[in-house]
Image: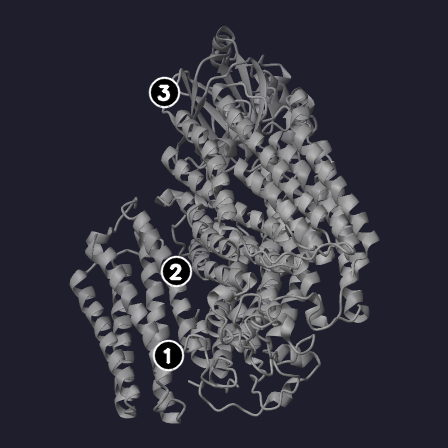
Amino acid sequence: MATTVAAAPAHAAHSQSGLWSWVTTVDHKRIALLYFFTALAFFFIGGLEALIIRLQLSHAGATLISAQTYNAMFTMHATTMIFLALMPMSVAFFNYIIPLQIGARDVAFPRLNAFSYWVFLFGGIFMNLSFLMKMAPDGGWYGYATLTSKTFSPTHSIDFWAVGLQVLGVASLAGAFNFITTIINLRAPGLTFMRLPVFTWMTLVTSFLIILAFPVITVALIMLMFDRLSPAATNFFNVAAGGDPVLWQHLFWVFGHPEVYILILPAMGIISEVLPTFSGKPLFGYAFVVYSGIFIGFMGWGVWSHHMFTVGLGPLGDTFFALATMLIAIPTGVKIFNWIGTMWGGSIRLVTPMWFAIGFISMFIIGGLSGIMHSSPPADTQQNDTYFVVAHIHYVLFGGTMLGLIAGIYYWFPKVTGRYMNETLGQWHFWLTMISMNLTFFPMHFSGLLGMPRRVYTYQKGMGFELYNQMSTAGALLLAVSLLVFLHNLIRSIRKGEVAPSNAWNGATLEWATATSPPPEFNFQKLPTVKTLDPLWHQDGPKGHKIDVGGTDGHGIHMPNPSYWPMFSAFGMTVMMAGLIFGLALGVPGGLLFVYSTYRWALEPAS
Amino acid sequence: MADRKRSSFSLALLAMAALAVLAIVAFAPEAARAQAMTYPQTTLEPKSEVARSIDEILDGIVIWVIVIFVLVEGALVVTVLRFRRRPGGPAAKPIHGNTALELGWTLAPAIILALIAVPTVKTIFANAKPTTGDITVRVIGHQWWWEFQYPGKGVLTANELHLPLGKTVALELESVDVIHSFWVPAFAGKKDLIPGRTNHLWFTPEATGTFSGQCAEFCGASHANMYFKVIVHTPEEFDAWVAQQKAPVPAPDSTSLAARGLEVYQKGQCVACHMIDGVSYGMLGPNLNKVALRQTIAGGMFPNDEKNMAAWIKNAPALKPGSLMMNMNLTDQDVEALVAFLRTRR
Amino acid sequence: MSEAIAAAAGSAPVVPDDHHYTSTGQSSRKILFWTFIGSECMLFGSLIATYLIYRGRDKVGPHPHEILNIPLTSVSAFVLLMSSLTMVLALAGIQRGEMGKTRLWLAATAILGMMFVGFQIYEFNHFVHEGLTLSTNLFGSTFFVLTGFHGAHVTVGVVWLWTLFFLTFTGRIKAGNDLDVEICGLYWHFVDVVWIAIFTLIYLLQ
């Protein structure tokens, strides 16, 4: 409709500041910062929930919180960490880094990008409002039928969860469409697919997983919401009418397992950037790392029932999913070997981002190995739904994803702020994290093997669980301290950090080629032409190709106009969805605002 | 950035941390095994062939896991130590890859996984063998207690599964409300109880005694309070137990406190949910016909004694979150009488 | 999901110095729209799979064979198929710069879409009178939710078509705006193809 409208002479209008400029921004770098700080805030909320859980479990029969509160805590801890902290923090990196790494001036659809952020923010706030109404979701982050039915969860707690996830799904989907298009279509001249940085590759794979996996959970949640409608409820999971609770599990895990790779692949991409930079040599086996990432993304669709080995799917089903699960360990192993191969023969600079990358590898190995232990269905029938699995997922999602994201924060901080983070505090952060996370999560292997089920708000004396739980609780408190050290470092370094040059670490990829740090709003005055992998390392010598991105003068470069319609559209949509719970009084105004804002957005000049 | 001094400090810490993790991985399972008697719900002390076949798979995988862990973490530590940047050290070699090496480390895990897969698949099929069993028990999951029915024996009990030694038991697993999971680690891995479906599980107990079990699938407010016991008898003792469960209970002496308790029971709301032969036929709550013979009450939460039973009858939801047995505001005298009556149910 | 559609219709890609530069030479809006369709396939795939899994598990009637009216639905399926033809003609119109024809065929497509929705409203109404509602049995739940979602997609398409139609009068859509019509067409054909799948699997292969 409005696409070919001539660009307005607007570049001067962008270097605004103030709150309103953040509300209307369509700059991928600013949206990245919005994502980052929002995700960080939710990460601390999720962490607080974890601490409450750990304190409640510190001794047998504790009564710090009630059973219902505990159930809400573990449900919201998982939901928050997965959907409101780790995923959006990955998206913050997608936003900041991808356009820079592919030599583009922004993402393909800057206003859709802003929309994604605002939907994420409003969705996250909406879900957490349930605490204020004392209806926090308490059916587990996986919400198994029939516990989520109106009969067994009569309050709105499950509605908050289902509607909240739907809203967040829209944010993830819109973002993923945008990044696929951006990576396919806005690569700098000469930047072929096999010259893409691995982080960009993993973003592409992750985005494909999102667009294919989220519709499945959307459908499952639609069924759940219709089942909870009154008076005209559907029968999808109504056993009396022939409905089957196992269908929910299939739909959920067809989404849920790719979701695990959605969480880990971006971190693997970050590691694949950090290791070469600080080893001073290119990634070992680039093609193997890329293909194994694609293979993991593909195989992630064939393993969902390994979450269901105790459901009774029969020996053939169990065998198929066990073998597929074991198969997926191979590309994962290949990645680890290639990372070590990258460091081998290098000249390793042991600074904080590198420490976290090394920490990622060492912890992810443990998570991978415990994963192999329950890839075998007979073994899994003893481990499933025990603390052994809790240990496993935390080695993968904290030891893996979170350490990878932290490595990315230390690595790209100089690009984002023009300053280094403090190295001494960084190393304290790293070692405190390593010690405390192992103290927290390693004992869970034992409490699990010794028979402690997960999602129990308490346990009896005489089961022998106290020692391991106390170790975990102590570790969790120490982990909180390490995160405070990190927070202090982050805030302090934004203002006082040592000034960094544009290529702060002698990196090889295009984000380090921008004229300044932080990059100018238009990123590159001249779009670079790329002739090799790791272009910044191949600029000298007779065969060298100089990367030229011009200077800081943005005169004549048309950038998209700021717009508040994406924000209003996102707000309207969230209110409209809330109307599914609270009735037409919310739904109708929300819907009208959504439709009106979307039309205004669609019809306003884009640039 | 990092000066020399700081990075050696870090390296020392890395080595220590690696050693600590290694020590835990290497020794703790053994320590746990040695002390298994203090862990009533451990998965590492199998007491049936089914559980042992699982434990053997786990042992096999654990050996591989430790080998891989030591090799890969070792390679990581060695690489970091050996190739850390030092003043005057060699420059990085611009190696892009090595196809033979990469194919090698793709094949190596494939072979190890195949070695894990073979016993896995064998065990899956062995343990899935359909069996009628020497004895069949229907296990019905409720929020938050277990019902055990012995078809053909006319016995119906709750939260205690009595079994004869050396006889294969075939369990039929069902649920009336939400998904639960039947788990008694000494005898078998867990199996879900799913509304609308019947699942099957079988095993042959190899030791007498009392074994702990617990619901393993989150099932609502009191999921944590859904315990049960498996009590394995010699076959003779088991037959005696069955006979005892079926033996009629004489009515309480009409002047006794228990007789007044029976009156309270019949007039109150108890009859709506509980079953006692010849008195009431409620099915929502546990069968109380022989309640005094059980070791625990309230889904395995409390030892079965007069004090606990009185407290439970007085205000169940206060003791067990979400309990469907309401506080019926009975007077202390009524509660005392009820307890006296229920103690006669043996 | 309509926000993605609106976005696809409204956001121009940021282009480098050359306004038309993209790595693939394709419009970013078209690529975005194809990814959207990929996502939609999983949405309808899940709904259809659920219908098929639950087929024949009803405890009470009415059952599909008692109530589905194949002749009537064949007519409405034919109407929807014809609308794909008119959509092609609308695109051909704007590609040739013939705005009159573009308007005519956009309106024809929208009207055929509305006829299809009308058939569906009639069908739903009829089923409710026959005693089949969302709550009756599994067939009612799976059928209404699946076909209802399809009908909602058609409705969104109709709104989109009318929007394009009116924009041709305001001058926002004029000769040269092929892409706006082409992307709407992609959506319309997709919705059409989904109906062919639904019609085959639910009506014909009972």
> Residue A305: in sight, yes or no?
yes
**Alpha carbons under labels 2 and 1: distance apart:** 20 Å
Q: Amino acid at mark 1?
A: Trp
> Percent x, y for residue B232?
53, 15
> Residue A455: in sight, yes or no?
no
Q: Amino acid at mark 3?
A: Thr
Judging by the rendered image, the residue that carries numbered circle 3 is B132
Given residues A16 and B28, the one toward you in this image is: B28
Q: Residue furthest left?
A: C71
Instruction: Please identify, in this view, whether the residue under mark 3 or under mark 2 is nearer the observer.
Output: 2
Judging by the rendered image, the residue that carries numbered circle 2 is C43
Subunit of mark 3? B
Subunit of mark 1? C
In the image, taking residue A171 as reference, residue B9 lies left or right, namely: right
On the image, which quarter does residue B194 sit in?
Answer: top left
> Percent x, y for residue B306?
67, 21
Whether A457 is drawn above or below A587: the answer is above
Specify which label sits upstream in the sequence, 2 or 1: 2
> Percent x, y for residue C105?
26, 84
Mark 2 lies on a secondary structure that is helix
Mark 3 lies on a secondary structure that is loop
- Identified at 68% across, 51% down, the residue is A49
Q: How is the image coloured?
A: one colour
Given residues A230 and B52, the one toward you in this image is: B52
Q: Which mark is residue C160?
A: 1
